[in-house]
Amino acid sequence: MNREPDGQMALTLQITRHGDLVATAPLQLTVAEAERIHAALCHALDQDPVPDDAPECRKPIQYPGGRQRF
């Protein structure tokens, strides 16, 4: 995902069919839309184990004296 000069976010989608790349298409999002997609993906992935190469936002955070949060 990249930030465009106008402040919007741009995500390049890859469209595949049976494993073969058919096309790429840019998806432009406002910051609010990108936040909603981020939250929805984190929620959807919550039940899956976090891979070692996952971004920092998927890794658990241990707060001092508190419970573990994601």
Image (cartoon, rainbow, N blue to C red):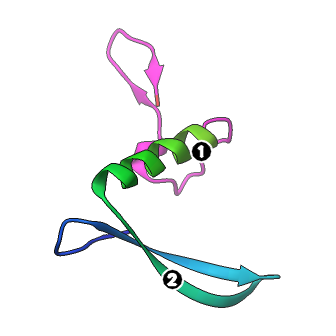
Q: Residues within 10 Å of mark 1 (few under 14, many from 20)?
A: few
- Residue visible at 43% across and 46% down? 36
What residue is disc 1 on? Answer: 50
What residue is disc 2 on? Answer: 25
Q: Residue 61: percent from the left, percent from the top?
A: 40, 30
- Residue visible at 54% across and 47% down? 41
Which residue is nearer to you in this view: 57 or 38? 38
Q: Residue 34: percent from the left, percent from the top?
A: 38, 55
Q: Is residue 64 above or below residue 4?
A: above
* Magenta-colored segment: predominant secondary structure: loop
Q: Amino acid at mark 1?
A: Val
Quarter location, residue 65: top left
- Residue visible at 66% across and 41% down? 49
Disc 1 on helix, strand or loop? loop
In the picture, the quarter occupied by the N terminus is bottom left
Q: In the image, is residue 18 part of the stretch drawn in magenta? A: no
Disc 2 on helix, strand or loop? strand
Tell me the distance, in whole angstroms, between the alpha carbons under discs 1 and 2: 28 Å
Which residue is nearer to you in this view: 19 or 13? 13
Does 18 sit left or right of 28 as displayed?
right
- Residue visible at 52% across and 57% down? 53
Q: Residue 5: percent from the left, percent from the top?
A: 17, 75
Q: In the image, is residue 61 part of the stretch drawn in magenta? A: yes
Q: Is residue 62 above or below residue 15?
A: above
Quarter location, residue 21: bottom right
Q: Residues within 10 Å of mark 2 (few under 14, many from 20)?
A: few
Q: Residue 24: percent from the left, percent from the top?
A: 55, 86
Q: Which residues are magenta?
A: 46-69
Count of marks overlaid on the render:
2
